[in-house]
Amino acid sequence: MILLIDRATMRFVDVNGTACALLGYSREELLAMGPQDVLPTTREQLAHSYDTLIADPSLQNGMHAYYTCKDGSRLPFESTRRVLRSGDRWIIVAISRDIRRRAAAEAALRESEERYRRTFDLAGSGIAHVGLDGRFLRVNRTLCEVLGYPQEELVGKHVKEISHPEDRDLTDARRSRMHAGEMESARFEKRYLRKDGSVVWVDLTVALARDPEGRPLHEISIMEDITEAKQAESALRESEERWRVTFDMAGSGIAHVGVDGRFLRVNRSLCEILGYAAEELSRLTVKDISYAEDRDVTDERRARMHAGEVDALHFEKRYLRKDGLTVWADLTVSPVRGPDGATLYEIAIFDDITERKEADEALRAAHEELKRSNAELEQFAYVASHDLQEPLRMVSSYTQLLQRRLGEKLDDDAREFMAYIVDGAARMKQLIEDLLAYSRVGTRGKDFKALAGEDILRRALVNLRAAIEETKAEVTHDALPTIEADDVQIAQLLQNLIGNALKFRGADPPRVHVGVVEREGEWELWVRDNGIGIEPQYFERIFMVFQRLHNKGEYPGTGIGLAICKKVVERHGGRIWVDSRPGEGSTFRFTLPKARHH
Ligand code: ADP
């Protein structure tokens, strides 16, 4: 647009076609107007600026503003003004260019900058522009939060100032490669020191902003606070380390075993148990070192474990050490499963039980031997006492015959001696019968069957009826359970204990009570009396064969009753013992297991 203005009249004196077209006025309309009619400036201000130009034409520089077009729209322009003298008139020549496009571009740029500024400020990541001198130029709010500094303190600070001393120069080498154009951006994990001195771990990405010619302008740094993740990581590392040490130091042998049976990891104890180095084991499978006969014993149950039917397995099996010795291991195996439930590997825990196994074996052998010799002894006692009966019968019957036939012919001495022989033979008969009864407990016992306790007690009391009446005894009892036992022997047991309670009575009439209490897996029964009691030093001895505390003059008996009781109780898998105090009565206790124990 070319517009000519008369300074004196402040009116357009000429305008070109472009001016008309752009402003939307006709030439005639424009020539009736002045610049103040289309510019956002007053006539006085304009006049003043024209006068300044007239006084010093060298000031004729560009000027930006907008014209108001006829339709009211604004037309941004850029203009150059010159002054012409025409006679006595001053004419201002304004040459204006339409700059709508540029203005639009500028506005778009401003908008975009605004957008980026907001993004920058609101971003969840810390963002900084760092000058080429390493100082913060701009920082966003998140970065201030991450680093714990207010914005104004951070701007101008050198990044190295707030870096953790150990990480200060970490990024130097790759930064300079980036500056040299060898890489676009670089990523680091490094530590900074917050204003309060605490350490913050940051995931840092650095890129370079360049001008259109490619010269570096500044760095753009994006930082994520990863302190928590780092702490979790190191906690994990620590816990892994703890487990590793536990694994290595454990007294049990521990191995991770692959599904193919290979040792993946083994600990020190396992190496000691098996006599191999860890590195040798890593080339072997479990079967390679299994004792030949035990090689496949675990296969079936292992397969069931892998199929998820059982959680863990427990075996005892033998392995072959490197030195060829056999080692017994107590083995617990459990699977580590993947997300789909398939076994990834097994954890196997080995305990060396060779010593226990050997001791078990020795014990078993000793037990066998003992059983054998006991049976032999029982058999011997039985045979001996059985065979002794015959000659004894001869002694007593012929002595009786002698007594009958020669009775009157014998003198007093001979008759007295004869009486001793008869008496001795009778006692020996009793002893032999007792011994036979004792040996029969083991050899002639009946099978166990379920029995009502009360019935058995009643049977024992029937046999004792005479003694009970004679001593005016009172026998009471708890409700007795059903037990699984040999009825004849248990009746014998109760009869012996109650009989003793009557026999070893004190001055008062005997009061006897049969009690019972249920314990874990067994019944405990007892027979309590108010008799003479027993000194503690005899508590063991009275249960032995022919051991008595009194001579037969005081209390009759052979000392076999309690020995039989003990044998009966032991045959039933129980124990028998006595509690007593002299003068205060005795309590004989015994247990009977609820389950069968043959
Ligand atoms: P015996 O009754 O034939 O002597 P036992 O084996 O039954 O043989 O008893 C061994 C000894 O234990 C008895 O001689 C007696 O001294 C003591 N004894 C057993 N039962 C009692 C009891 N209820 N009170 C006191 N002493 C007892």
Image (cartoon, rainbow, N blue to C red):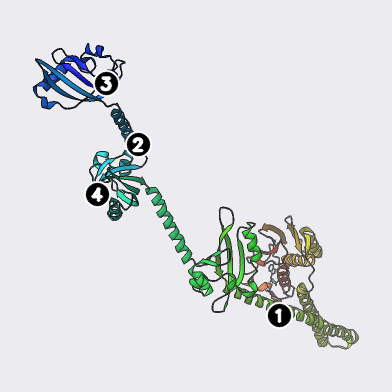
Q: Is residue 459 above or below residue 430?
A: above
Count neighbours of disc 2 (C-alpha within 10 A) and say few if under 14, some if 14 to 19, many if 20 or more.
Answer: few
Residue found 24% across the figure and 14% down from its top: 30
Of the residues tagged 2 and 4, which is closer to the observer? 2
Q: Quadrant of ligand 1?
A: bottom right
- Closest to the camera, between mark 1 and mark 4, is 4
Residue 427 to residue 214: above or below: below
Q: Earlier in the sequence, mark 1 or mark 4?
A: 4
Q: Residues within 10 Å of mark 4 (few under 14, many from 20)?
A: few
Please name whichever residue, 523 or 189, is drawn nearer the observer in this view of the structure.
189
First-in-chain label (2 vs 4): 2
Mark 3 or 4, nearer chain start? 3
Q: CA distance from mark 2 to mark 4?
A: 27 Å
Ligand 1 closer than 8 Å to label 3 CB:
no
- The amino acid beneath tag 4 is Glu
Q: Which residue is mark 1?
A: 373
For mark 3, give the secondary structure: helix
Q: Which amino acid type is marked by label 2?
A: Thr
Q: Mark 3 and mark 4: span between their CA atoms?
A: 62 Å
Residue holding disc 2: 119
Q: Considering only vertical position in the picture, is 568 above or below 50?
A: below
Q: Secondary structure at mark 2?
A: helix
In this figure, which residue is indicated by the disc labeled 3?
18
| Secondary structure type for disc 1 | helix
Secondary element at tag 4: helix
Q: Is residue 170 above or below residue 301?
A: above
- Checking the image for residue 161, the label placed there is 4
Task: Indicate the quadrant where residue 465 lies.
Answer: bottom right
Ligand 1 closer than 8 Å to the CB at disc 4?
no
